[in-house]
Amino acid sequence: MAAPPPTRRHAPADDRHRPDARQPGALALIALFLTVISVPGLGLALGFSRATISESEMRELAAWPTWSWRFRDLAAWPDAFQTYFEDHFLGRNRLIDWRASLLWNGLGASASDQVITGRNGWLFYAADGGLSDWTQTQPFTRDELEVWRETLVRRRAFLHARGIHFLFVVAPDKQMIYPEFMPASLRRLRDDYRADQLIAHMRATTPDFEILDLRPALQAAKSGELLYHRYDTHWNDRGGLVGYQVIARRLARDFPAIEPLQRRDFDTDPSVASGDKTTMLGLTDPGKLAMPGLVRRGGSRHQVVFPDNADPYGEVGHLITERRAASLPTMVMFRDSFAGRLIPFLSEHFRRASYLWQNEFDFEQLEREKPDVVIQEYVARHFFTYVPYPGIIPE
């Protein structure tokens, strides 16, 4: 006879409804997981992340994608939103900064392929043509130099026909002034830069065209004090002042009312930073924080009139300054980020100065402002990333 099947023992009713001893921890883990995956999106929806610039990546963040009912736009919208979300979720910049700090302080390594780790703790900007201009794997071709020559000559002729002076200025990259801190592993194929090639070409083909190269003055001044920050691609107030003085002395030849400012005309002010807050990798630069800015003794004579509450160092696309001095000329400057340290100095010499952050001329602005002088400033690495087009300049 087969044995009867074993009877199943049932737990008492109070045991069946008693919480598992592991249940509180599991619930806490689930709550933590849900919080982690929802907070970034919730913070984005509530508008906690309003940044438009990533300081550590030195780039503009993606804008909110525009909605359209067209089929092609509808199909592309999810990818555009994904890009926006990845740029703006709550805590993104903090996570990037933590990672950069851990790699830099723990391993002495760069968290970005756009930043070169140099000697003695110096950082250099690899992107935006910086690395290419250093290694010189692709020097200017003859045709490229001719395009630049035609562009510059046509720009000058366009302005000259309207009685406007033209000054073309080259600002040096940090590695041009401090090459000794670049890593030895980055070997150069040539001793010169694209800026040298352009200057030599213009001297050979159009000797009456002047290019104002700021390097000699900065190289001569670097033994006296630090001119660029270790963690920043830009010069500081002291480097900007040296560059400004070269420009001001040249302007004074055409405009005698301009009297270049000297170092003795400035005081150091610990409450004013000697450089913008942006640093490569988003790291805190003790040297930048410890270096006081330069302020005009007795206060600046000019004021920013556009836009309202603008950064006086011109970290906006369009900045206008004015000074009450009828004898001074007017100016329009087409510039890049290096002009930020020049603006507080140059603005002292113009009754109206308009600064536009762009490479090409803005002909509507020129017609509106009718300036006495146009200054066009390029940092040297942009000769690798910007290609001029002479055809847009009217004959």
Image (cartoon, rainbow, N blue to C red):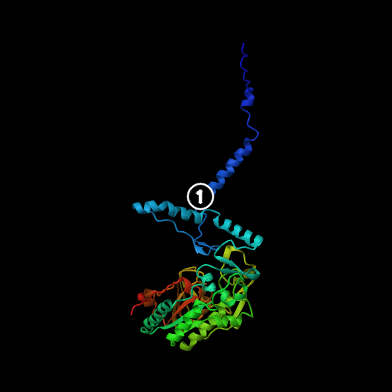
The residue wearing badge 1 is 41
Q: Position of residue 394 (x, y in %)?
A: 34, 78
Looking at the rendered structure, the kind of residue marked 1 is Gly
Q: Name the image quarter holding the N terminus.
A: top right
Name the foreground residue: 394 vs 260: 394
| Viewer can see residue 258 | no
Name the foreground residue: 326 vs 96: 96
Does residue 260 lie above or below 283 as drawn? below
In the picture, residue 393 is in which quadrant? bottom left
Q: Which residue is rendered at x = 64% and y = 63% of the image?
A: 108
Q: Position of residue 50 (x, y in %)?
A: 50, 58
Q: Name the image quarter holding the C terminus.
A: bottom left
Name the foreground residue: 160 vs 215: 215
Describe the element under mark 1 as helix, strand or loop.
helix
Q: How crowded is the residue under tag 1: few (<14 C-alpha within 10 Å), some, or many (20+)? A: some
Name the foreground residue: 240 vs 392: 392
In the picture, residue 371 is in which quadrant? bottom left
